[in-house]
Amino acid sequence: GDSVTQMEGPVTLSEEAFLTINCTYTATGYPSLFWYVQYPGEGLQLLLKATKADDKGSNKGFEATYRKETTSFHLEKGSVQVSDSAVYFCALSEGSGGYQKVTFGIGTKLQVIP
Amino acid sequence: DAGITQSPRHKVTETGTPVTLRCHQTENHRYMYWYRQDPGHGLRLIHYSYGVKDTDKGEVSDGYSVSRSKTEDFLLTLESATSSQTSVYFCAIGVHGQGEDTQYFGPGTRLTVL
C-alpha cells in the first residue's frame, strides 16, 4: 500500500537558518503530493502541492519539488522565522474528481528559536 | 478559508457514553472526511461521505458511525466512547474541479475520554 516517511523531530533551528524536512513516499500509481502545516491548536492548512513529476510547489517562502526518480518531496525554506514553528505533514493523494485516498506522514515538529 | 467548522472544539466525556461530533461546511462540496490524529500516526481516515446518505469506512472505522442527512453536515458518532478514542478529530472536505483535487481541513475537536 501507499506510505509516506518523514522524521518526527523535533527539528530545532535558529531564526534565519535553512530548513529541510525530508519526505519520501511509496505509491502504486501517480499520486499528487502535499505539504500541510499545523500551528498549535489549529487544523491542518495546505502549504503547497505538486501534481506531477518535476513540478515545484511553493508558498510563503517554502518550496518542494516532486522527484519521481527518488520518490521524494522534500520541504525547504531559505530562512526560517519564529512564526514558522509548527508541525509539518507530508501527504500523498491518489484519485481524482471523486474519492481521494490521502496517506499522511507522521508529521515533523519544527521549533525555531530567536 | 475553506468554510469548515467543527463543534464542539473540546469535549471531555466518560467511558461508555455516546458522543457526537459535528462538521459543517458552507460550500456544498460532495466529499467529506473524518480523520483522527494521534502522535506517531499522523492522520488516519475513519469514515468518508460521497453524498447525502452515502458513506463508507476508512482504515480505523471500528467503534465509529457517521451520518449525512444534509450536504453541509457530516456527523461522527462514538456509540460508547472508550479511552482509546481519546484523540483530536478533524473533518475535511474534498475540493475538485479546475485541476484541483485537494482536501481542506476544519479546526479540529479535541476529545478526552476518561
Image: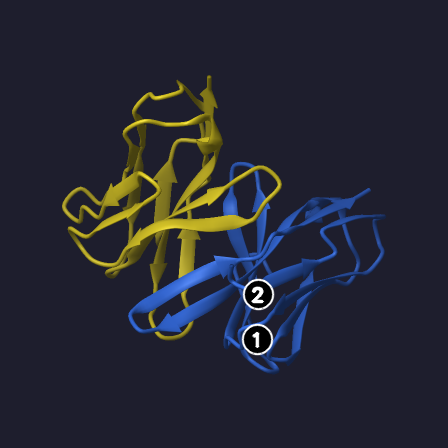
Chain colours: A yellow, B blue
- Classify A40 as above or below B27: above
Residue A25 point in image, percent of width and height = 30, 46
Location of mark 1 (residue): B55
Amino acid type at mark 2: His
Badge 2, how many Cα within 10 Å: few under 14, some, many 20+? many
- Classify A92 as above or below A7: below
- Classify B33 as above or below A26: below
Location of mark 2 (residue): B47
Whether residue A73 is visible: no
Say which residue appears at 28% left-offset and 46% top-offset. Answer: A58
Q: Is residue A76 left or right of residue B89?
A: left
Q: Nearer the viewer, residue A29 or A47?
A: A47
Say which residue appears at 26% left-offset and 43% top-offset. Answer: A64
- Chain letter belonging to callout 2: B
Q: Give the alpha-carbon distance from disc 2 to disc 1, as whole Å.
A: 7 Å
Split into 4 quadrants, where in the image is the C terminus of chain B?
top right
- Chain letter belonging to callout 1: B
Q: Is residue B84 left or right of residue B40?
A: right
Amino acid type at mark 1: Thr
Please tell me in which quadrant of the rendered image residue B23 appears: bottom right
Q: Nearer the viewer, residue A58 or A87?
A: A58
Whether residue B108 is visible: yes
Question: Is disc 2 placed on a helix, strand or loop?
Answer: strand
Say which residue appears at 36% left-offset and 39% top-offset. Answer: A5
